[in-house]
Image (tube, helix red, strand yellow):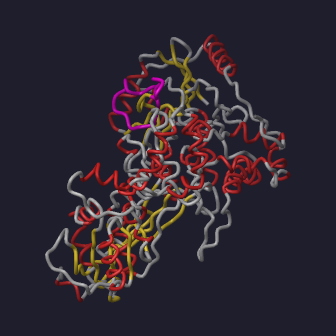
Amino acid sequence: MIFRTFKKDELKKLVEILAAHNRIVGPVEAGRDKHGSPIYAFNEVSDFNSIRLNYTTTKLPAKRYFLPFQEDLSSFRTEGGGWQKIIDYNADKPLIFFGLHPCDINALNKLDKVLMHSVYPMPYYAAKRKNMFIIGVECIPQTFCFCRSMGADTALHGFDMFITDLGNKYFVEILTDTAYNFLKSIRTEEPEEKDHVLYMKAVAERNKKFTTRVDTTDLAKILDMEFQSDVWKHWGEICLSCGTCSNVCPTCYCYGVEETVDLDLKGARKTKTLHSCNLIDFAEVAGGHNFRPERHSRLKYRYYHKHRGFVEAFEESLCVGCGRCGESCLAGINVPEVIASVRGGKIKK
Amino acid sequence: MKTKESDTKTYLGMPLYRPKVGFFEFSSCEGCQLQIVNNESTLLDFLSLVEVVSFREAMTEKSDDYEIAFIEGSITRDDEVKRLKRIRKNAKILVALGSCACFGGVNQLKNRFKNLNWVKKEVYGRHPVDTEPVRAVEDVVKVDLKIYGCPVKKEEVEKSVLHIALGKSIEIPKYPVCMECKANENICLFDLGELCLGPVTRAGCNSWCPNSRAGCWGCRGPADDANVEYMKKIMKEKGFSEEAILERLECFGGFADFLKRKK
């Protein structure tokens, strides 16, 4: 890994150079909530001033750029006596992600394991993922974040460069030659010993701000033991089965595929749509049988996929601890409380 | 509405079933029927799939020779009951089109009043009309398919008709509007301090209202397994009055069963 520092006003220049030939996705203010607090979202940006690098967290991850909610996998059109098949991975241009937090970078690393490095890689994901240039940025831990418990508070790989604010300058970690070459176009300096000290200080300061913890010790085993626990029924009673937790999750990748015929009868398409294990028809099969007709069992399996199944397969959790699901859940169901209730065998009132 | 293609319509070389259909309005604003003729870009393809024999909103000709009857509107008068029963006899498949036909729609709000005569006087004054408590179509005759919404979503009607022509099953989303709303990356209406029935209302509208930052009023009725009881509690905890919550849940009639259960 190569480290550099650069003055803060160089950042604007860097973004302008990147934006000249590329599309940039970054955190922007999408609106204000009822208390007047900003609501952040990832969006395409062309103006440096609209990027909010000090954003808290976005309501939704940048998922639509690498796992769009809906995507045509293939389509065909009949022409004369023959027909033509069209397959598009929908990744014609590279995309620069400016300002991803470590949790969201780790989410991509986890998705890679399933969608890129598994027996059957998904080309629709891989094409987009390979076309990404990622500039990570250090975050300010929020009260609902528990990424540190999930080991996702720092990112060691999965980005091109990573920026940390040292007060009057930025400290940058460089992982790829693309990033190195881009940085040649602005003025950077070799970090000195005092910059290392400042960096470590900044990291220590940030680490103090983590307040929410999830005890993951032996969690996969405990989940195995507590499969029949009554606490699941409690969470099931209040769950709205609306699928919001999956939609705001940076690692939920489950989907359904539907084949439809065009209205003019001259073509058809196969469409992939993200689904949620909390939705009533998630485990409904041909013939109408539903393997998980009860809310609590659907909610339970979401936790089992994240904290047990994935752990057994990859020795790490599928949850990065970004806390978005708990923040967006109208019923207030959140990972720290659910895991604590399973471990303790009762609901904390 | 015969097209030249009518006798040669095929899909992958196979001749296609082209049903004769009729559209009929009962107590309603006829907005759902307008939706059918609204989308010009697909209108001709849609009309070539079916042979429309009766559609007062769009054509002069009339016929009782139809296989599929689309019923728009709720049933509020005695003559409507007779007419609906006659249509049911003529049709092989009867489709309830839109919230009024499916649940009674906005019209069923009058059923809340104990004294119907007072309602009649208030609304019609010195020009009384013959009117009864509002009923959904399925409370009068057998309904084979329901297409929800106020108004219906044109794409959903097109897909349903296409699937009838192709002999494919018709799947309507079982999950709530929230799913589509989050996919559209809308800001949650509750974050903005507004009321929304998206978490309990059946999806399929592509979160039409929340896309315009307007809370859902539940026109498509409850999703399968909708947790209405807990949603009521959440709305109350967020500071919405019992009246405001009831107003939403009662508006289109889809949640009537959940309201009865409690009291």
Position of residue A228 relative to residue A332, above or below, is: below
Q: Position of residue B98 (x, y in %)?
A: 36, 63
* Side of B233 relative to B25 (left or right): right
Instruction: Check the image and report above or below for A98 versus A79.
Output: above
Q: Which residues are magenta?
A: A33-52
| Quarter of the picture holding the N terminus of chain A | top right
Q: Is residue A275 visible?
A: yes
Q: Does residue B116 show up magenta in the picture?
A: no
Nearest the eye: A311 or B194: B194
User: Vertical placement of B84 versus B34: above or below?
Assistant: below
**Quarter location, residue A194:** top right
Residue B224, position as x, y percentages in the image? 55, 60
**B96 relative position to A299: left or right:** left
* Magenta stretch: includes residue A34: yes
B219 or B155, which is in the foreground? B219
Seen at 64% across and 51% down, the residue is A113
